[in-house]
Amino acid sequence: MPSVFAAGFALSISLILAIGAQNAFVLRQGLRRAHVGAVVLICCLSEAVLIFAGVAGFGVVAERAPWALEAMRWGGALFLLVYGLRSLHAAWTSTDALETGGAATQSLSAAIGTALILTWANPHVYLDTVGLIGAVAATYGPARWTFGAGALAASCVFFVTLGYGARGLAPIFARPRAWAVLDGIVGVTMLALAAKLALSP
């Protein structure tokens, strides 16, 4: 059973390490020390629902409703396009208001809403976290829930480390220019992801 848990942990961490909108948002919240606990909790709870939906067989449902995945693909591409353009605009117009030591300007509800959208509007969440993890978990038979627990543990460790570990970078991001660079990288990444979704077969 420990080996099954480790297998789930390894697969999940390999999937979640990829740069994405959700990870970038958690990193940014961690750097600003703005509602980090709430954002990390939302991400972990969402991962729990998605992973165990996959383990329970949601991947099969997704295969039988390709139209749903297509709708999520285009919806996700549109959202990432808008998010990317907003990040590039922020990079171009960034000011001292973005200093890490300043007060958070985003409300708790806005932070939670953004975390939810970035998680649930991403089609890759359903293809990778639900479909792939669910498919691999099914090969473990009765031990599939242990595999799912390992996958969830990896996600939670990652988000906690990303959110709270970002504080170590705070001195670097005390300068507005650093925020501009981060926003620029996030913006370009989001536009690339949007293009990838739109152009994928």
Image (tube, rainbow, N blue to C red):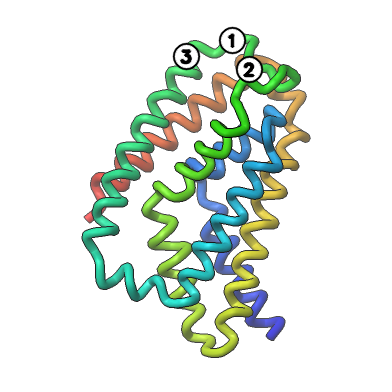
For the point 53% across and 70% down, which residue is it?
Answer: 52
Q: Say which amino acid is labelled 1.
A: Thr
What residue is pinned by disc 1?
95
In the depicted view, which residue is nearer to us: 68 or 6? 68
Above or below, 56 against 121 in this view is below
In the orientation shown, which residue stands out farthest toward the front? Answer: 109
Asked if disc 1 and disc 2 are in contact, CB closer than 8 Å, the reply is yes
Which of the numbered marks, if any, corresponds to residue 92?
Answer: 3
For the point 24% across and 64% down, which residue is it?
Answer: 66
Q: Residues within 10 Å of mark 2 (few under 14, many from 20)?
A: many
The C terminus lies in quadrant: bottom left
Q: Residues within 10 Å of mark 3 (few under 14, many from 20)?
A: some
Q: Say which amino acid is labelled 2.
A: Leu
The residues bearing labels 1 and 2 have C-alpha atoms spaced at a distance of 6 Å
Asked if disc 3 and disc 1 are in contact, CB closer than 8 Å, the reply is no
Percent across and percent down for residue 180 are: 55, 19
Above or below, 92 against 193 in this view is above
In the depicted view, which residue is nearer to us: 181 or 194? 194
What residue is pinned by disc 2?
98
Q: Say which amino acid is labelled 3.
A: Trp
The residues bearing labels 2 and 3 have C-alpha atoms spaced at a distance of 13 Å
Residue 154 sits in quarter? bottom right
Above or below, 172 against 78 in this view is above
